[in-house]
Image (cartoon, rainbow, N blue to C red):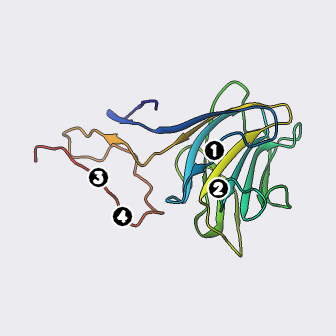
Amino acid sequence: MINIWLVLLGLTVTGQAVVEALRTPDDEGFRHVPLTVSDRTFLAFSVKACHDAILDLQLTPGSTVDDSYEVVLDGFHPGHKSVIRDDERTNQMAHKDGAILSCNEFNDFWVSWANGNIEVGTGKVKGSGRFMSWTDTTPHAVNAINVYTGWGATGEWKFYDLTRMNIQTPNDESYRHQALDVSDQTFLAFSVKACH
């Protein structure tokens, strides 16, 4: 794991945020064990790839045939189009034109799938920077996510668990940190260390 340190308005936010880092070759195939996400409804990640970075949101881990949602980022090279598909390589349910990836830098994204509402956005805050969305009228659960690159592109991926973080607050009786998005949660577990 990699420690992430951010300074926000005088606050220090730390956390063991990167839970998985992967490299994907230029071969249009899944080469890694799928990430288990059965206890969540969204995932924040970063990817560095020139184009064609693909996520497969799977009901059954490892199965790309039935009951999966495919998210293509900056695909169809050199066309630069991002899409959401119902199952692998089916019709596009949503799309966005334009380049959104970089060969040299990591770009941050989030993907969510609550109740069959598939959404994709930029950054690490769910709901912020949304550029694609589609609602499946016959939704299925998402229990795993797998990724690949191809068509001339390799990729580096970082997956985050932003629910584990430490926030240090100064003694000045004001709110100085960014609000935590708990819209997909029914409870919040936390610990506090303070004098009073």
Direction from residue 58 to residue 173 in the image, left or right? left
Q: Secondary structure at mark 4?
A: loop
Q: Nearer the viewer, residue 177 or 69?
A: 69
Q: Secondary structure at mark 1?
A: loop
CA gap, disc 1 to disc 4? 29 Å
Q: Secondary structure at mark 3?
A: loop
Q: Earlier in the sequence, mark 1 or mark 3?
A: 1
Residue 46 image point, x, y percent: 60, 38
Identity, as a three-letter code, of the amino acid under mark 2 = Pro
Residue under pointer 3: 190
- Residue 96 sits above or below residue 91 on the image: above
Circle 1/circle 3 CB separation < 8 Å = no
Residue 37 image point, x, y percent: 55, 55
Q: Earlier in the sequence, mark 1 or mark 4?
A: 1
Circle 1/circle 4 CB separation < 8 Å = no
Residue appearing at x 54%, y 38% in the figure = 20
Q: Can you tell which mark lies on residue 33?
A: 1
Circle 1/circle 2 CB separation < 8 Å = yes
**Which-is-in-front pick, marks 2 and 3?**
2
Q: Secondary structure at mark 2?
A: loop
CA gap, disc 3 to disc 4? 10 Å
Count neighbours of disc 3 (C-alpha within 10 A) and say few if under 14, some if 14 to 19, many if 20 or more: few
CA gap, disc 1 to disc 2? 8 Å
Residue 173 image point, x, y percent: 21, 46
Residue under pointer 4: 187
Identity, as a three-letter code, of the amino acid under mark 1 = Val
Residue under pointer 2: 61
Identity, as a three-letter code, of the amino acid under mark 4 = Phe
